[in-house]
Image (cartoon, rainbow, N blue to C red):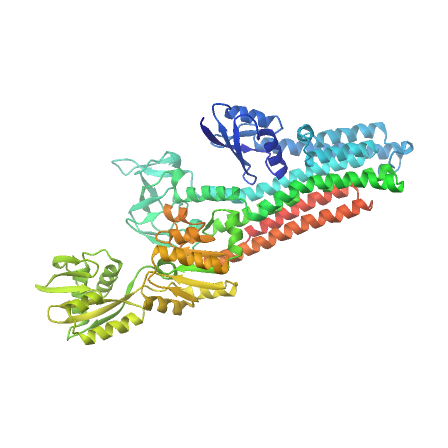
Amino acid sequence: MTTTQIALRIDELDCAEEVVLLQDQLNGSRGIQDLGFDVVNRRMVVSFEADQVSVDDIITRISKIGMHASREDQPRESVSKSGVQNLRLLLTLAAGIAITAGFVTHVATTGNLLAPFEVELLDSKQSNPVASQILYSLSIGLGLWFVLPKAWFALRRLRADMNLLMCVAVVGAICLGQWLEAAIVTFLFQVSLLLEHWSMDRARRAVSSLLNLTPPTARVVHVGSDHTHERPVAEVKLGARIIVHPAEMIPLDGRVLAGDSSVNQAPITGESLSVAKSIDDDVFAGTINGEGSLEIEVTRLANDTTLARIVHLVQDAHASRAPSEQWVEKFARYYTPAMMGLALLIAMVPPLLFAAAWSSWIYNALVLLVIACPCALVISTPVSVVSALTRAANHGVLVKGGRYLEAAAGIQAIAIDKTGTLTRGEPVVQEVIPLNSHSRVELLQRAAALESQSTHPIARAILDCARNEGVQVAKAESYQQLSGRGAEGIVSGKPYWIGSHRLMLERMPHADAAHNQSINLKASGGSVVAIGSEAHVCGLISVADTVRDGAEHVIQELHDLGVRHIRMLTGDNQETGQTIAAAVGIDSFLAEALPEDKLRELERLREQYGSVAMIGDGVNDSPALAAATIGIVMGAIGTDAAIEAADIALMSDDLSRVPWLIRLARRTLRIIKQNIAFALGLKLLFVGLAACGLASLWMAIAADTGASLLVVFNGMRLLRK
């Protein structure tokens, strides 16, 4: 039995009501195993048994409840979202015209401008003229065109939804003689659906803007010549050569073969400064070339670029529901039946117990049914979360789901890796101390000669220092590595060695002056490299990793945001850890930590503080990143492993994005709470008004429409700077 998964576009999927309809129609059906929904992207993922049901069968079942489905991996059919939207707009306009005509006819027939509003309940003496009733009926029919099929399906399933509630309210109003009010209710309901679709489309456009960051074509160089031709990016193969001129957008990930330029990587990383690019540097799709032309070798296909992976993860993140969203859906599940029960009580209790007029209290119950729609409540959370996730992605912060965004708002402690996170991860020479009558140039010549065959970061730092000072570098002869301690070789015909303090003690155990100076250098936070000959220690070089610009300010910001404890985890020695921690204002640190030590420390912090974030580079920090409440990886651009390792990826090496993210997460939670409070508060207000007989049907639908729009626009404020 083979399980297949398919993603379907559902053109009418705009609210939790549609989700319920689809669940009722498909759950438990033959061959259907699981359903997943992404309302914002109008997307449903179906897991099914291919030998029992086909994709066409599933699409046919969906069409029976008045929805249009199509495969996400295929082009849209002619009857698409735009066609349905245009038909909805046309029917709404026609319904409005019919209401206006009915109103004018009513006034012309009676000769009284207020006559349409003076029809009393069940009063045949002031009934609507036949002509106006026909026009009102036409308006009602047009307004319920999309509603009736869903209402009928809900009635068959004995599961009330907004469509059924609306139809009951309209039928009740007609039975009470309120033709104009019934027509206005259906018209306003149709307008509210139009506005809801439009506002959700606006949120979707913000998400889809990520997809439009790359040009549709690439300028490909012909093999064996310098001639170029335009080709769709989807048809460009690995290894192809493409040309990108100044101010053009780079269409595919690649490696620079020729040219020098600066590239604006802000669309992916959010960095404001351009990055210099030359031969062998990596470039990424969606970034903008600067002042020079670049010839690039394509290293990733169009559907596998860094930007494509980001877009895919952002889209998947929308389907990962936040805790507040799950709570709202659970609440709505019980809320609607409770409102129906309350409407029944309002309709029956006053007439039965207090001999009140049945018509008036049935009308009040119908008002309650209209305002009972949970749409504004249910939509309040996903729009806010999607807006926040999209804004974060546009600023180079990739959050893999709403639950991680909410978790970021409540972080109490942070564990942070040192190398590559608080520091640049690129050691540089701090001090050069010649000893025993040697000069600085001599010391750098011998050190660089011995380190020229090493790939260690400290070796690269010494070589860079020598080249920057104009020292001629020649490779050492008879070069030999000394396991874990250093290296030795022949420089200018004489044997020399280079290595750690430990190696110096082995070779020159009685060099007390060099030994004392080495201890002092280590105490200042540097790694000490000693260079010596058979006769003496030639000198010492101190190499240290440099703190990132602004790291101290970021740590202070995190403290100001209420993070209770920040602990640095490093594999470096105690002295280096102490120096860096003091320089940036870290609360505490753990030095000489192995990956398993970092994991144990994360577990201890979670026990003490509850919600803990881990910030690292995604490589040796992977166990700790996984153990944290949220794992945040630094500098993930172009790195598959880093993006996969964490819950949140900072696409640039900008540590300041962490407090920025916490502020965004907290603002998102505030807006979600505002939306929930407003949606529930408005409904409670109308429950009270309906119970007191002070609300009308058109007031209820107008309030419900206003609530839906307000929570949508309030959530979309997160897209603004």
Q: Can residue 356 be seen in this view?
A: yes
Percent position of residue 472, x then y: 17, 63
Extreme residue toward the left, this view: 493
Left or right relative to 455: residue 204 = right
In the displayed structure, would residue 520 be above or below residue 333? below
Percent position of residue 269, x then y: 42, 52
Q: Is residue 639 visible?
A: no
In the displayed structure, would residue 290 be above or below residue 346? below
Which image quadrant is residue 105 in? top right
Which quarter of the figure is the C terminus placed in? bottom right
Left or right relative to 457: residue 364 = right
Which quarter of the figure is the N terminus placed in? top left
In the displayed structure, would residue 368 be above or below residue 131? below
Which image quadrant is residue 490 in? bottom left
In the displayed structure, would residue 622 be above or below residue 342? below
Percent position of residue 503, x then y: 19, 65
Left or right relative to 482: residue 19 = right
Q: Residue at x 89, y 35 (%)?
A: 111
In this view of the protein, which residue sits in the foreground, 390 or 284? 390
Left or right relative to 87: residue 125 = right
How many labels were placed on the picture?
A: 0
Which image quadrant is residue 600 in? bottom left
Percent position of residue 633, x then y: 41, 53
